[in-house]
Amino acid sequence: MKIIPRNFLFTLVLGIVAISAVAQDATDTAPLQVRDVVRSTQMGSGPAPAGAPGNGRYSPPMPADSSLPTLWLIGDSTVRNGTMGDNGPTGQWGWGAPLPAYFNLSKINVVNRAFGGTSSRSFYSGFFWKSLQPVIKKGDFVIMQFGANDNGGAKGKGALSGIGDDTQMNGTETVHSFGWYLKQFVAETRAQGATPIICSLTPRKRWGPDGKFVRDNGTHAAWAEQVAKETNTPFIPLYDLIAAKYDQLGMAKVDTLYVPSPKEKLHTGWDGAVINAGCVISGLKALPADPLADFLSSRASEIAPAPGAGGAAN
């Protein structure tokens, strides 16, 4: 029997490792596809709990590995679209679907608990936060983004304007300001020993006569930043980061990112969700002390920190 030299075997093993590494790098650098979504990050596998929306179809996702820290995402349909978290009936996707690809899931769980149609008020006061807050544990993280459904005041489903302590009654419900609800999320996240991170909302599509993307960030986006400063919470100016990206891409390209195009103004398709998720990572990296830096995947290394954006609010 012919004996294979030991150095040949050693070289062969190194070659296999190198090929595997190249293959992994290729996987991490290839454009993200819908098939890359890890379903367990978006939808649970158990029966629908009492009080859950979706006529028995929605099971809240849970951490894949309870021994790891968890990044929880909360928000509306711009973060997670469709009852099943699988893009809804029109091909719309929230940025929370592609986001897990930018994290090393062997180091951290990513769980998208956002739900379409919710406002800061309805998410806090109803099933969603009541079922989530008790399972947040020490060392976890919560990224929150609200505002798209927070208009309408006390008689609608949204919050009152601003960040103050004023209230109005809607039947037996005491309705608070947008900022008040964000402050509750922040305080109750910290009470669990976890780290809150505030995002401003994603922008609605609107172009000016000069061909530039029109910013309308003086309300909920500004109030989110004010709450972050008041509570010393890390803040990602997602509205401005996306708007700047859209200016770079131009009107013709951006129109294709919203679906159905061109009439849709708020919800993106898959390509838009990937761009928005990249802006979240860019904003995280711009924080003076990014609390999630140790958990990013190699794919995230392709994204540069947003210049002059984000920060641990003072």
Image: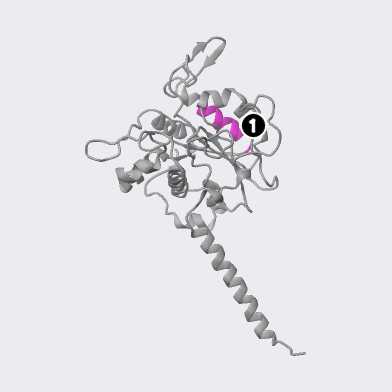
State whether residue 183 is above or below residue 238.
above
Q: Position of residue 265 (x, y in %)?
A: 38, 33
Q: Nearer the viewer, residue 285 or 77?
A: 77
Q: Is residue 237 visible?
A: no
Q: Judging from the image, what secondary structure is the residue with disc 1 in?
A: loop
Residue type beneath disc 1: Arg
The image's colouring method is one colour
Q: Nearer the viewer, residue 119 or 184?
A: 119
In the picture as drawn, the residue positioned furthest to the bottom comes out as 2
Q: In percent of the image, x 49 and y 59: which residue is there?
A: 29
Q: In percent of the image, x 56 and y 13: which residue is there?
A: 173
Q: Which residue is mark 1?
A: 57
Q: Position of residue 223 (x, y in %)?
A: 42, 29
Q: In percent of the image, x 56 and y 40: which residue is there?
A: 86
Q: Position of residue 77 (x, y in %)?
A: 50, 33
Q: Is residue 3 visible?
A: yes
State whether residue 312 is above or below residue 223.
below
State whether residue 16 is above or below residue 213.
below
Q: Nearer the viewer, residue 23 or 279?
A: 23
Magenta-highlighted residues:
181-193
Q: Nearer the viewer, residue 146 or 248?
A: 248
Q: For this view, does 104 lie left or right of residue 205?
A: right
Q: How many marks?
A: 1
State whether residue 200 is above or below residue 23.
above
Q: Is residue 106 magenta?
A: no
Q: Position of residue 88 (x, y in %)?
A: 52, 35
